[in-house]
Amino acid sequence: MAGFKVMSWNVENLFQPGGEVSPGKVMQVSEYEAKLEYLTGVISDVAPDVLALQELGGDEAAVEKSLTDLSNRLPDGYPHLAMSNHPDGRSIRVAFLSKQPIVERDDVVAFADGELSQVANWASRPPVKRLGRGALRIDVEPAQGVRVRLVTLHLKSKLITYLSNGDFTRFSPTDENERAIGAGLALLRRTAEAATVRIYLNDLMTAGGGVHTVVLGDLNDEPKAATSQLLVGPEEKDVTSQDKGDTARLHNLMAALPRRGGMENDKWFLPEGERFTRIYEGQGELIDHIYVSKGLLGETKDLKADQWRVREVRSLVDGIRGESVGNNAGARVGKEQPDHAPVYASFDL
């Protein structure tokens, strides 16, 4: 039986040397080389078939160079790459490296039509109509007759920036009203982004065709947050039973999967000591996720017997222990070690 492994990592400000990571701070050659060396070591140990990356910086040529530099250092070779064509205002975008050829790709950028086609912004700014960082979908065929659709995304950060002299240059509000408005607007944007990706997948997943779906990336929210739950789809009460929602539903491998008998019977794949992916203000938070469609969990009859296609799910938290981050985004410029733990999952196809 063929195996398949996916990995996701927010690599935190992977810019080319000379790239402006934050105002007045650029990536140095030594910093870039050290970061690539660190990333290469971890990725080589995991050896995923497909690697999803978030927070690559620069224009298209710079990001392609970073991806190529990383690929060339990896022993197994990742000759196939794809990057989002729609970065955010800091030139940050998502991307993929793959061992298998990419047979299809698509950018997810504009908010879904209808009620969420635009969301409120600060009064001096027009409404927001697109994902801050475009999501990216690729399809690969890791085994004969097996197709996997993968989407990587990097949703709106919980770090709030406030207008100062017409630009977003402050991280501290002037008063409680401004703080509440800033947090509310950020939540609206993150919600619209999650809903857009969910709506994008609805037609693809319900069309059938036996294509597996994997959604992975930095959601900037915990598994039980409303934005994270939006991506799951129809509510699931027992993952080992079959129902009409299975065709559209996603299952978060970083969280407990519900089984009959109550919470004590939930199925966990992620080890208890690894249930966080970043340390913020001294507290671990689980904000990087891997969602999969039902077919990657297994056949219903096998799930009832506690037999799963999921081999392993990990969050490699040893690399971030002691790396607590705060609201000063410039404080970590030049760090070789990203502030997020990489996550991965492997399957029997």
Image: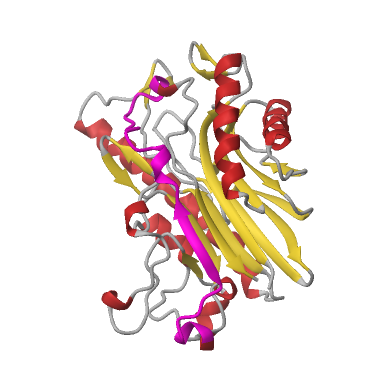
Colour logic: secondary structure
Residue 250, given in percent of the width and then of the height, sits at 51, 68
**Residue at point 37%, 41% (across, down):** 278
Instruction: Decide which of 86, 259 is in the foreground and name it.
Output: 259
Residue in the image at 52% along x and 28% along y: 13
The answer to whether 134 is drawn above or below residue 242 in the figure is above
The N terminus appears in which quarter of the rendering? bottom right
Region of the chain picked out in magenta, as a range:
302-331
Residue 307 on the magenta span: yes
**Looking at the image, is 46 positioned above or below residue 74?**
below
Left of 139 or right of it: where is 301? Answer: left
Is 15 or 44 nearer to us in this picture?
44
Does the magenta segment cover residue 101?
Answer: no
Question: Residue 299 at x, y = what percent?
Answer: 57, 83
Spot the residue most to the top: 24
332, 87: nearer the viewer: 332
The picture places residue 80, in percent across and down from the top left corner, at 76, 45
Locate the C terminus by quadrant. bottom right
Counting every numbered tag in the picture gives: 0
Residue extending farthest to the left is: 176
Q: Is residue 196 visible?
A: no
Q: Is residue 20 above or below residue 160?
A: above
Tell me residue 44's x, y (percent). Answer: 61, 43
Whether residue 331 is visible to the viewer of this picture, yes or no, is yes
